[in-house]
Amino acid sequence: MSLQEQKERLVKLQQKMAAYGHAEGLIYFDGTTGAPKGTAENRAQTLGILSEELYNLSTGQDTIDLLEDLDAHREELSDKEKRQVDLLLKDIRMMQKIPLDQYIEFQKLMVEADDVWHTAKEDNDWKLFEPVLERVFDFHKKIAAWCEPEKAPYDYWLDHFEEGLTMEKCESFFASLKGRIVPLLHRVQEKPQLDTSILHGHFPAAAQEAFSYELMKLIGLDLDHVGLATTEHPFTTSIGSHLDERITTHYHEEDFSSSMFSVIHEGGHALYDTGSDRDLAYTVLDGGVSMGIHESQSRFYENILGRSRAFCEYIFPSVQKHFPQVQGTAEEFYRAVNRAEPSLIRTEADELTYALHIMVRYELEKKIFAEEIQVKDLPAEWNRLYKEYLGIEVPDDKRGVLQDSHWSGGCIGYFPSYALGSAYGAQYLRKMKETVDVDGCIRKGDFAPIGEWLRERIWKYGSFLTPAQVFENAVHEPFDPTVFTDYLEEKYTELYGL
Amino acid sequence: MSLQEQKERLVKLQQKMAAYGHAEGLIYFDGTTGAPKGTAENRAQTLGILSEELYNLSTGQDTIDLLEDLDAHREELSDKEKRQVDLLLKDIRMMQKIPLDQYIEFQKLMVEADDVWHTAKEDNDWKLFEPVLERVFDFHKKIAAWCEPEKAPYDYWLDHFEEGLTMEKCESFFASLKGRIVPLLHRVQEKPQLDTSILHGHFPAAAQEAFSYELMKLIGLDLDHVGLATTEHPFTTSIGSHLDERITTHYHEEDFSSSMFSVIHEGGHALYDTGSDRDLAYTVLDGGVSMGIHESQSRFYENILGRSRAFCEYIFPSVQKHFPQVQGTAEEFYRAVNRAEPSLIRTEADELTYALHIMVRYELEKKIFAEEIQVKDLPAEWNRLYKEYLGIEVPDDKRGVLQDSHWSGGCIGYFPSYALGSAYGAQYLRKMKETVDVDGCIRKGDFAPIGEWLRERIWKYGSFLTPAQVFENAVHEPFDPTVFTDYLEEKYTELYGL
């Protein structure tokens, strides 16, 4: 087969993978939105078959031969083709290092773990979850040892989810954050709390939905290619390619700001995905490159833009248009949406305390991999760290160590990328302000210059650049977490009159 | 390979086909419900790939060998396996008789025809559609000649869509209908029209939606396995198997009865599909066997039950609960929902005139296949027959010959099954009344005995029995269209005081 034919097969392979991804993504999306509630088994039947088909396609001998051939001629490939081959080979290389029976056992374990976790969380039953989580962590150690024996196992998994991330980077990053955020939070807590009563009342879902669409358009989403639905937990997903993106929200009728900031957050994810260059569609380079960079977009829109004074001033008349019962001033609204206080649940945490939730998880994962603690110690350690970092008591495991789906979902080593993403945003903002009048644009409701800045530096590359390259390409300077902590300190000092 | 292994492969083959069907069905459903409006191209990309995969799976040499081997040992197969092999071989046998280049050309033609029809209908431009429809009819003639040269081409297509249906059966059926319905309609038209004002007003979609769910539960749908959505045109579809069914409706805010009867109609389809025995799931025997039997269920629920006096009396208090502005009596409601009058659009036709719309289409299809008329004659012939059967003038082709998607969708020979289904229902009713107090049940809101009767005789078989066997099995007597015309005559004589 000629190299040209191989390149065509590479295109076709990725198109097929995207088609299966479309089916699987939509089935998952449907399961959380319109599907009748007794149909999970039916979806599982189909997903089982389609994922087997996709697995055979992406890891079959034909595919391996093709990719290895192309890899052997990489000097004749374009940069994009090289990156495609690398990404496609990544999982194959990993699988090649794991004994087949172990690989299958791992898949089964993760299905079991997810199932047990759901019950354990619902029943607040850590003891139910503990043995299976022990096996999950053990398996993660084994996989790391098979795949990259020269690396510390936790480094293997950090890199697995955020290419290039290491414990060393995390250590200095989190130390920097902890040293600034914990004292800042203590000072905030000494002050009278900000008043959030402006956010409360009764806000019918229909009015919130109309407001959602207005927000989506405002931040620059193309509603011809981005849909909105409601689910228990908000999320964003691409359906087949970046040409069809869906975000979801959840309307709390007693507080309109919850869905409002969910929409902006998920909208940030969707802007990133849909901002991929058109020719990346139906390739593995389509859409955002990592959860870290993804969160750097979603949290940038939600917090850095959405919770800015400029935005609150711009949007407040719209808030009052959709919810006429909202009285008060834009300034009161700004203060209400920026209330900071330690809380139990990561996904509900505010801009100031969010990173502390992540640090708890990072510390625990790190210590388990280092065998400094064991899985059975997790609840006590969890509660101890929440007390230390956030100053609060965890009343039960349901609202403690059992709250997240990540560990049972095979995402150990995933959390740090969230905090990284938060911190990146502050540095984007500083850089962006060199050429864009960010506040001025927001005050006019003109998000286009902000979007263009991000598109040119980040979005358009999809997954072509590595996460580290994306950041470097965006700001042309090293990552400096003090930009983020400076941002927080300035904001909260002013807000709370510290 | 042992027979046992072959049987297992037969199971696996059908499970895979069901999984692809799940994906394709859901992508289609999504396209008409939640998908952003600019995403059609993205769906086309995925559907193109998945349908190619499914095509390769269901018609690949491995599959053909398997099915032919099993067919050669049919005496060792169970009845269900025999029927599975027969149904799976049906399309393969057809494809084997069509030259490959012609088969591909046909697929392309149908894509083109569908596309041209959409534009032609929108622009009321018959001349645009005529040449492509000419090629569509010609191709249908060629295919019939390749596949069953001994049969009249129209008989081939009638049987293709409703196994066992022939022109001979249609002739006597439609003659019987025409001889009774046309004079009955004339007598109706001489009387003062029934008053429908009770149906009109402003009925918010949210209230109609609540009513929809009440109706779904009332007729016996299991909402854990049947979902409801809104679309431009109501339809019903299975998602992967009968364990996940979706119906759709369209809320006209000025007339609540439109959606009400759509929900009952689509609900009838859904009852049929979801009534398949559990072990038929993920086989080709899952769900309804033909459009004729399907319509015999949907129209039974919509018209024979839903437009009965007993039902109108039972449901009227609920109507007033959901729509408090509705004044008047159950009897006025009954009369309003049974107004009969000639109209232009088949899908909006009432119970009395519906079959006449079908007969126009049957006559035209028959004459084209018999070469008594040509495609270019269709608009004039259409308008002539609407005048003759329904007594109305067709103002334009958009509301005439261009209204249906069937001809451009490759469904020539499909229409007669709709009328057949309508007629079957009256005979079910007569038979059912021998053992079930139908009106008594309805007056109590107890649909279970009716559903059980249908489940035991029809639903549970899925596609295991042929359409003719289903009907025979349900009533144990020959099909007699006069039962239907008697039913109509009795109903409309009383309603209009003829």
Image: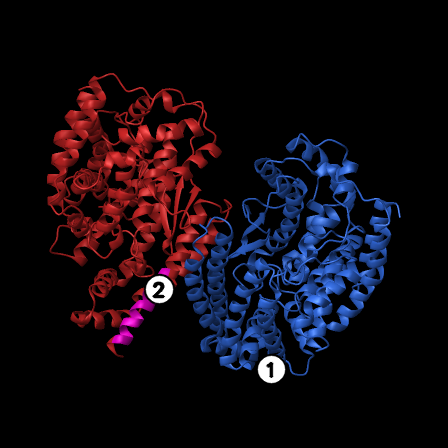
Chain colours: A blue, B red
Count up the numbered dots.
2
Residue B15: numbered disc = 2
Say left or right for B411 vs A9: left
- Local packing at callout 1 (Cα closer than 10 Å; few below 14, some 14-19, many 20+) is some
Furthest-right residue in view? A498
Residue A391 visible in this rendered orientation of the protein? yes
Residue B306 visible in this rendered orientation of the protein? no
User: How far apart, in angstroms, are the residues tagged by discs 2 and 1?
Assistant: 35 Å
Q: Residue at x 43, y 28 (%)?
A: B321
Residue B278 at x, y percent in the picture: 32, 58
Q: Is residue B23 shown above or below B356?
A: below
Q: Which is more toward the observer, B389 or A312?
A: A312
Q: Residue at x 30, y 26 (%)?
A: B334
Q: Is residue A137 shown above or below B176?
A: below
Label 2 is placed on what type of residue? Gln
Magenta stretch bounds: B4-18
Chain letter of disc 2 in the image: B
Q: Quadrant of residue B75?
A: bottom left
Dominant SS of magenta comes to helix
Magenta region includes residue B77: no
Residue A288 at x, y percent in the picture: 62, 59
Label 1 is placed on what type of residue? Trp
Residue B426 at x, y percent in the picture: 19, 37
Magenta region includes residue B17: yes
Q: Which is more toward the observer, B2 or B447?
A: B447
The secondary element bearing badge 2 is classed as helix
Q: Is residue A172 shown above or below B314?
A: below
Q: Quadrant of residue B195?
A: top left
Q: Which residue is mark 1?
A: A146
